[in-house]
Amino acid sequence: MCDKGSMAQYTRVSGFVGLITLQNPPVNALSAAVRQGIVDMVERALSDPIVKSVVICGQNGNFCGGADIKEFGTNMSGPPLVPMIDAIEAANKPVVAAIEGSALGGGLELALGCHYRIAHSKARLGLPEVTLGLLPAAGGTQRLSRLIGVPAALNLITTGIHVTAAQALQLGIVDQVTDHNAVEVAVTFSLSVAGQSMDARRISTYPCPLPSDFDALFEGVMQKVRQSARGAIAPVACVQAVRAAATLPYTKGMEREQELMATLFTSGQARAQQYCFFAQRAVGRWRMPSGARWETSKPMPVHKAAVIGLGTMGRGITVALAQTGLSVVAVETQEKQLMEAKQAVSGMLERGAKRHGVAPMLDRISYSQNIQAVAEVDLVIEAVFEDMALKTEVFQQLSAVCKPGTLLCTNTSALDVDKLASEMPNPELVVGMHFFAPAHVMKLLEVVYGPRSSPQAVATAMQLGKKMGKVSVAVGNCRGFVGNRMLMPYLQQAFFLLEEGATPELVDRALEEFGFPMGVFRMSDLSGLDIGWRVRKRDELVEPDMASGQSARIRQGSRYSPLGDLLCEQGRFGQKTGQGWYRYDKPGSRVARSDPWLHSFLVEYRARHGLVPRSIDHQEVLERCLYALINEGFRILEDGIAAGPEDIDVIYVFGYGWPRHRGGPMFYASMVGLAKILERLEHYQQAHPDVPYLQPSSLLRRLVASDSPPIHRWREVIKKYQSQL
Ligand SMILES: CC(C)(COP(=O)(O)OP(=O)(O)OC[C@H]1O[C@@H](n2cnc3c(N)ncnc32)[C@H](O)[C@@H]1OP(=O)(O)O)[C@@H](O)C(=O)NCCC(=O)NCCSC(=O)/C=C/CCCCCCCCCCCCC(=O)O
């Protein structure tokens, strides 16, 4: 017997079991129609006298990905989740959740309303609402705390992590894990408990087990989330909701859960985080200005890859490749460096494997000092020193050695990928892969195409990035690509603010309170001040520190601050030398301390250049640094280097520490209001006419003139703008 009409299919199986199958591909999200289907089918199963037990499962081996995120922010209709789940829990026949694929968010909350949970061994479970700026408000905070205890519930709910079926069994979230068909196992099991009282299986009736160190636990967790969330409100609300579970009766706890959710649900932070969720997926649907796009570009098969150059980046890339299960040839011509790299790579693989409880992929890698070893690989990632002449030489060797059709990728953070390609016999096989350090940890990968890169080459690099667990974004070729290009005006404004009266501490505090994990100066100290110095020297911007006055701070026709150069001339390269914008107890130490020397140096510098310091507040720091960065983002869109604002936002959230609860720079601009950004840029440009980065971009002006459309409609304006160029 079967009813296929609704988005929850009803079938009677094994004679006496009502099987309810959620059907809303691809993840069976709980849309209004699915919720209606569940309500109707549960009612039907419970009122059918032949049915002794009920099993709930999801179509296509996927239980449920939670509430339908697309419905948030709309006029939500259909039956609400809480009474729907309460009705399931109150049922007088056993209801069993058969969990395959994922049970996330509202999906897990639905399962927690069932009397039993049986999971397939490959299933994953979690309450990731916090990552969407929300909390599990369909009873998740109240039921999970009662089921697995407060500490474990706090961990899952405040981080949003997904756990494996085995971990869920250990925590007590599921009752059984099976390698067989979970639905069949659940059907058989449900019959075995049919007729029994379900009173002891209703989680809402459980007392919440209280830890002995209750107050200390909550204080500690609250402090931790406040520190790591940096202004995000959802993790704090999650802690408060779990506290309610521990201190209030169930119904009162539910009221508190709803109350906290009501604040989050309509917040700008929730909108920002949900935008990030969809943006992360949208960047996979890449397109190039030539019209080539993801659906029509088939990746080449990659079975064997090579890495050339085993410095810090090369080692991380080798680890990331080996962890995908690929065979990797790691080449380093210097013997000592090769030995050190081998040891470092093995260590990273072993530590990673230990964390995940798997065997390290050590045997996937073969090491060589000879570039001939890459003759049979399908793809090479060159990661030698950031120098065009050296990279060109390596690429020429590669094209002589590699089999025809091998994809040649360069790991570069700023060099001209097209220039490199133009030196090769097969420029269509050349793409940039800009990894971020540490390359085996950082999620972002910029895949850089030039005008000659073939769509197949881009598709292959994008797919490889995905296999490595990266969020890959395809971007056009220009100085600094997207991320580093936008960083230039941001850094420049930070230097200018120091000249005008700010301190590194003030600038960093403003940015950290905004939500960055580190302000610009602490970040520069961490990455090394000498990196930028080398680039500025190559660009012939660095001059001997002789002159004073305004003219000494003009280079190539624009305002320039030599502050960073002056620090480097003193050997202050940041953490590695124990001194930079801050001082450190010893070279390599991480704790940044205010440095009186630096403050005196700034006073003396300003006096020498006739700069009168003035009071600068956080608002100015944010406007100057962030709006200059955003302005460059608009130029990048104008130039077609990024296909849409989502690409830029994903790059900044995943690669540059932009706080996710602010959605990325372009989303943030849309929230602040484009007219306001334009007005402030015009204001600062008038005050600093020698700073081209503050000149508002034409696209920003065009968007404002088009009544500042919502961000999802920017692409239309961009397209029109580009067609008129
Ligand atoms: C792990 C996944 C499930 C699958 O991953 P993968 O296989 O890699 O596939 P993806 O590429 O990620 O996804 C495929 C497509 O599916 C889309 N998708 C995925 N999940 C959802 C979803 N939950 N909703 C909608 N769409 C979804 C995805 O976008 C892809 O499509 P496209 O490429 O973008 O086109 C993975 O997808 C995943 O992790 N999904 C998200 C899981 C998740 O976060 N779930 C939690 C959702 S939130 C939730 O469940 C909340 C529950 C409680 C809600 C209670 C609501 C009550 C509202 C009351 C508010 C009270 C306020 C009142 C205010 C007032 O007073 O007025």
Image: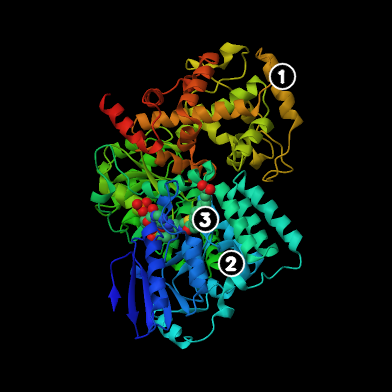
Residue 250 x, y percent position in the rendering: 63, 65
**Mark 2 — residue?**
144
Find numbered disc 3 in the image and state the secondary structure of the residue it sits on: helix
**Mark 3 — residue?**
129
Q: Disc 3 beta carbon < 8 A from ligand 1? A: yes
What is the spatial separation of the Cα atoms under label 2 and label 3, in whole angstroms? 14 Å
Is disc 3 in contact with disc 1, using a CB cutoff of under 8 Å? Answer: no
Q: Sequence-wise, which precedes: disc 2 or disc 1? A: 2
Q: Residue at x 43, y 39 (%)?
A: 648
Q: Depth check: 114 or 565 in front? A: 114
Dot 2 crowding, Cα within 10 Å, few <14, some 14–19, many 20+: many
Find numbered disc 1 in the image and state the secondary structure of the residue it sits on: helix
The answer to whether one can see residue 328 in this image is no
Q: Nearer the viewer, mark 3 or mark 1?
A: 3
- Residue 604: mark: 1
Residue 498 x, y percent position in the rendering: 64, 24
